[in-house]
Amino acid sequence: MDLLDRGARIGTAGFVLSRLLLEPPSLMLAENFASPQMRDTWPLRDEHSTAALASLAPDPYETLPRDHATLFRRRPPRVALHESAWLTDVADPAALRADLTAAYRGANFTSLPAPVDDNVGYQLAYLADLATRVGRAASDGDGATAQEVAATATRFREQHTDRFIGPVLDGVEQHARTHLYRAVPGLVRGFLAAHAELCTAATDLRETRARH
């Protein structure tokens, strides 16, 4: 699988997972996850993703918005999705949000609402966007740009998402009541693993071409 295809697949998965964290699924999305035929079209096939997909089963649609609200929107939420809620070294959440907004704007990522907060759903959307950019740059033969975008993505994961995603996913596994939201942690782990592998491959591609 070439990097363009890998980037597109990882990007698609990340955008879907971002939506599932930011808002309840649409009826169409819920039906897709409930259908074995549609689950077969999920773009990632790593160990985490396949195990999560195998655990899926239809949920009554009305239970999904309720599960989403209970997990993420009640006061307090069962599972906090915000980076500032987990990290003891975040003294100023407003400064963190400003840093994230600057990172998104610096990468010309403009598909998020304004103002942006530090919800991990937005972070997954940003990483998904960077994955598609890595793939496109590699496909165009622009190894330098692919490497630069991959480095940006790796730095962002290490400085932000990777620092708190573990307890977020553990919390979802513990508290989710629907098949769909119980599957989300495995799907997110698969996405992040595939994303890291893509970034490594982009770096290796540049180094291989440089040797030749």
Image: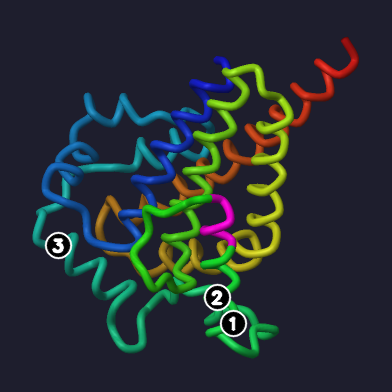
The image quadrant where one finds the C terminus is top right
Q: Which mark is residue 63?
A: 3
Q: Identify whether 8 is placed above or below 78.
A: above
Residue 120 shown left or right of residue 195 in the figure = left
Q: Main secondary structure of the magenta part?
A: helix
Magenta extent? 103-107
Give the structural element (helix, strand or loop) at label 2: helix
Of labels 3 and 2, earlier in sequence is 3
Q: Quadrant of residue 90?
A: bottom right
CB atoms at circles 3 and 2 under 8 Å apart?
no
Q: Amino acid at mark 1?
A: Ala
Q: Residue at x 53, y 26 (%)?
A: 136
Q: Which residue is mark 2?
A: 98
Residue 145 lies within the magenta run: no
Q: Which residue is mark 1?
A: 95
Classify mark 2: residues with Cα within 10 Å, few (<14), some (14-19) or many (20+). Answer: some
Which x, y percent locates residue 113? 34, 64
